[in-house]
Image: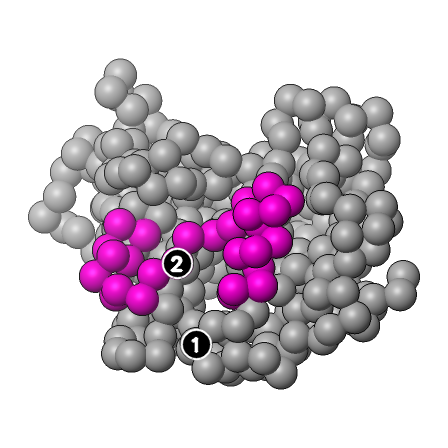
Amino acid sequence: MSLPLTPPVEPQLARSSRDLPRGEGWVYEPKYDGFRAIVFVDGDDVHIQSRGGRPLRRYFPELSFAPGRYVIDGEIVIDAPDEGGVALQDFGSLQQRLHPAASRVAMLAERIPARFVAFDMLARGDELLLERPLSERRVALEELAARDGIDLTPWTSDSERTAPWLKHGEGVVAKELTAPYRPGARRGMVKIKRLRTLDAVVAGYRPGKEPGTVGSLILGLYDPDGRLHVVGHSSGIRPAEKRALRERLAPYENGERGHGDPSRWKSEEEMEWVGLRPELVVEVSFDHVSGGRIRHGTKIVRWRDDKAPRDCLLEQMTG
């Protein structure tokens, strides 16, 4: 490629915050639940790079980009049904797309197609745009999107308009209009995740690495027919509590024990589980639902001795 910027390029990153920055000089975009990607287009030659610098093009043959000479930053997503008028993404289906077999890649590209949403422009022709302020890069990106039909993320300078993204979406990314693009740096961008809570039945636990401790709680919710569904697990247990928690849960053990399917990330031993009678309720915080499960940093907020297990319903997942 003869572009002024060639792969791999580290994407600019966002620092986390609980609060939305406000005031002049800030603009806001919805946060997406997809694969961060930088796209390099040189004529008909297209290279798609992951956040970590790996090539992604072969996994997403349905993504098309108009011929030209440009580099754009964005997110590969698979759309899910809207919630509250906010576009959502299906991250579980997106993960399925990373398959080694070309035949399966082709089948999935047709069955669950992805799209690329652009939110920054790093180069145009022979011009490198990294040192330009975001306001100028956005104008260049809008011109490209209008001409070549590229999906462009919405943005706004009105902080009040972010409310639906925080209530129904994945959250908000706030950006400084005057900031340059800094590859690999957490400057000029802030992410505010949507944080949610629900009350779940403690259906079991996974033993901790240390004998006599609890590693995580297995969480369940009831459907309208009274069936209990495992919807995830809660970690984030402080080391000082892991042994005491094992003692607290012991009276509720129902004699069921087993092992989940091993994976390349966890050993068979780490997937061991112990079943409990569905009598304990815990409130947990989480920021993401995918494939009918709560994910991403699920943490215990408090025990709910005041709530009946049968009142812990699946409908909380879409609330």
Question: Residue 291 location in percent, x, y?
Answer: 49, 35
Task: State yes or no: residue 153 in magenta.
Answer: yes
In the picture provided, is 244 more to the left or to the right than 121? Answer: left
Question: Residue 94 location in percent, x, y?
Answer: 61, 39
Of residues 55 and 311, the one nearer the viewer is 55
Which residues, given as a range, are shown in magenta?
138-165
Residue at point 59% right, 42% down?
Answer: 149
Question: Residue 39 location in percent, x, y?
Answer: 72, 56
Residue that mark 1 sits on: 177
Of residues 78 and 272, the one nearer the viewer is 78
The amino acid type of the residue labelled 2 equals: Trp
The number of discs equals 2
Q: Can residue 11 be seen in the rendering of this structure?
A: yes
Residue that mark 2 sits on: 155
Residue 294 occupies quadrant = top left
**Residue 30 versus residue 259 in the image, above or below:** below
How many residues crowd around disc 2 within 10 Å: few (fewer than 14), some, or many (20 or more)? some
**Residue 233 versus residue 3 in the image, above or below:** above
In the picture provided, is 131 more to the left or to the right than 64? Answer: left
Element type at marker 2?
Answer: loop
Which SS does the magenta portion mostly show? Answer: helix
Q: Can residue 252 be seen in the rendering of this structure?
A: no
Of residues 112 and 142, the one nearer the viewer is 142
